[in-house]
Amino acid sequence: MYQIGTSNHSYTITPARTSTNTEFGDWRHYGNDQGGTRFSELLQIDPENVIRLRLVWEYTGSDNIANQTTPLKIGRTLFVCTPNGAIALDAENGSSIWRSVIAGTRSTARCRGLAYYRSTSIQGNCAERIISTIVLKDPFDVRLIALDARDGSACSHFGIRGEVSLLTDLGSVPPGYYEVTSAPTIVHDKVVVGGRIMDFQYWGGPSGVVRAFDVLSGKLVWAWDMGDPSRTLAPLPGETYTHSTPNSWAPMSGDDELGLVYVPTGNATPDFFGGNRRAFDDRYSSSVVALDVTSGVPRWSFQTTHHDVWDYDVASQPSLVNFQSGKRLIRGLVQPTKRGEIFVLNRQNGEPLFPVTEIPAPQGTVPEERLAPTQPISPSLPSFRGRDLTESDMWGVTPLDELWCRIHFRAARYSGTLTPPAVGASIQSPSFFGGMNWGGMAIDTARGIGVVTTTYLPLHVQLISREQVTRLSIKRLVPGKGHPPVPLSDQLILDALNPFNSNVNLGLLMNPWRFGGPGDGTPYGSIAASFMSPLQIPCTKPPYGRLSAIDLKTGRLLWTQPFGTMRDAGPFGIPSRIPLPVGMSTNSGAVVTLGGLTFIGATMEKSFRAYETTSGKLLWEDRLPTPSDATPMTYLSLKSQRQFVIVTAGGKYIRAYALPDVPRNDGVSHSSKSRRAI
């Protein structure tokens, strides 16, 4: 923690949109509501009875389940995204209703969620439909698909036999260099999608264009190409959307009433060097942008990192809630970031609701680069960027690996948070894992509490010259095959034995989990990896992950604690079997309920937990067959009137938990109690 919040504001928090009776107990959007709060009004399971929660069914079908997916629940059916299509399960017992398996798909494609739509203008086939994405292997293609929610058949009037290619008008796209990682967003009968562009590889890659398609026909309605605002539909024949623009891979949010879709953006590749970027790249990168859902025209944008050379994409879904101050209702947006900063904005105009100030930023040594002189922070809200590192923060399980970490920390360039990449090793903290990543924030709108997971794993980064890129034979990443091996030479080994040598860092170069790439088309390539010792243990002291709660009414920190233990981790990846609460890195997020609980998996530990939202007290835990890297969800079964909690784990399991019997408080609260702020 760097600061705990000093705001003098006092608001009441209310949902951006309240569920109707017909939707109560469902989970209809990736974040439950269009605003992505991940809040459920169910209260059957509460702090007093959660200890009796039991596994009631487990789905382990033959389908590969996307290991980061959050299902939807509509009526009596659970819909789950798979790399091959989708599956539908009975929400009461997990039995299979239908499976959609599309031939030729890539079984390792990511799919964190899907979208549901019910038409009021058509009857029969595909009046209710599931919208998702798939990746085809040969030939490579990324497609938006529409399936009949009743039986999983393709909606034939959507695109071509239920599919729309998303590679159209992107130009030449190497296999795996474009994918859709988040659930499509549906606002005003339009399916809005962005896409992830492969990081670090080259300048001139696919466009980060955001597009909207008609939910019934699949026809392109508009395109937001930030490099050419006049190009609102498809490019002219022979042209493409503007290459190398910042992309949007994180979950979006929508506001039907305002007619806006909120788009979190990343930065332009190749990420660690920005000297090639154009004015429009710098204007919209690492921002949240409000687009008019009718036209795709930006209404406003707010930038969380100026001229981002740290890969600080806005990875978290914007959370939409309302702030009440006296008689004044302010439509708000809460935006967590990888930097660990949280920005709270007016979602009608992008103006900050909590103060935002610009602070001086460290400057660099790369002559072809230009860096922003300042960066924005929210000084009155809790910051999760962590304090600046010192040599005394270096740590190891033995004196030798601690010494190794101290030497390499001293050899690296580090001037606090936002230290820019340099020729020669530098330390980046927070890393591009976060702070907060795509798990975002879960907001209990009844209590006005936001719950976040944060990661504290510094990054070891190095820019390398074109000469070094050639000498080291650093090639573009081949998706699914990792980085091509680097041929070792006597001179390379001699260079690398000296940690103060600016040519190359052998620990970085030989790390099998390294990131980076040749940076073709720019003066520099890059290599990067988590700052770890040769034992593959972080070089900094724990905790490496935290679970925290913020009082959004006042902006103050309620509680924070290390999240996760070393039970399933250890040196060289060997499980220690010791449940030391060191805190583990996280990506995914939590779900919060009116019953006062926070459910979360999210770490590399094989555990699923329930905490009391107001205090952070651990109340319940169950062991999973594999770690869960997915955000859970919860719903009310129409058949048994029981509240279920669902979590997916390891790309194979869907697990459902419920109380063994239905308590007298059946969890169905349509009264004002479930709507008001507590």
Image: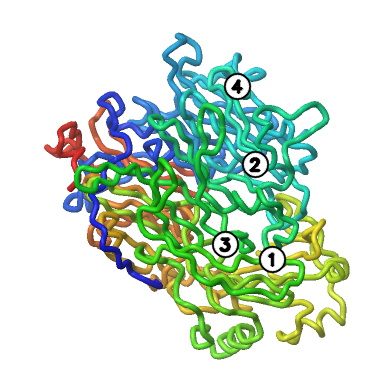
Gap in Å between the C-alphas at discs 2 and 4? Answer: 22 Å
Query: Considering only order in the chain, which callout, 1 or 4, is on the residue closer to the N terminus?
Result: 4
Residue plotted at (66% across, 50% down): 281
Of the pair 566 and 660, the residue shown nearer to us: 566
N-term mark: 2 or 4: 4
Give the quarter of the image for residue 566: bottom left
Which one is closest to the eye, mark 2 or mark 4?
A: 2
Q: Is residue 21 found left or right of 370 in the rendered image?
A: left
Mark 3, Cα crowd under 10 Å, few <14 / some 14-19 / many 20+, is: many
* Residue at 24%, 35% in the rendered image: 642
x then y, percent, for residue 477: 75, 55
Q: Position of residue 633 (x, y in %)?
A: 37, 42
Give the Cα distance between marks 4 and 1. 42 Å
Q: Earlier in the sequence, mark 3 or mark 1?
A: 1
Name the N-terminal-most of marks 1 and 2: 2
Looking at marks 3 and 4 on the same chain, the residue that comes earlier in the sequence is marked by 4
**Residue in view at x 64 percent, y 63 percent:** 309
Mark 1 is on which residue type? Arg
Q: How many marks?
A: 4
> Pointer 1 and pointer 2: residues touching (CB < 8 Å)?
no
On the image, the x and y values in percent for residue 289 come to 52, 44
Nearer the observer, disc 3 or disc 2? 2
Q: Which residue is mark 2?
A: 226
Q: Which mark identifies residue 370?
A: 1
Q: Which mark is residue 19?
A: none
Q: Secondary structure at mark 1?
A: loop
Amino acid type at circle 4 is Gly
Q: Nearer the viewer, residue 553 or 53?
A: 553
Which residue is under mark 4? Answer: 218
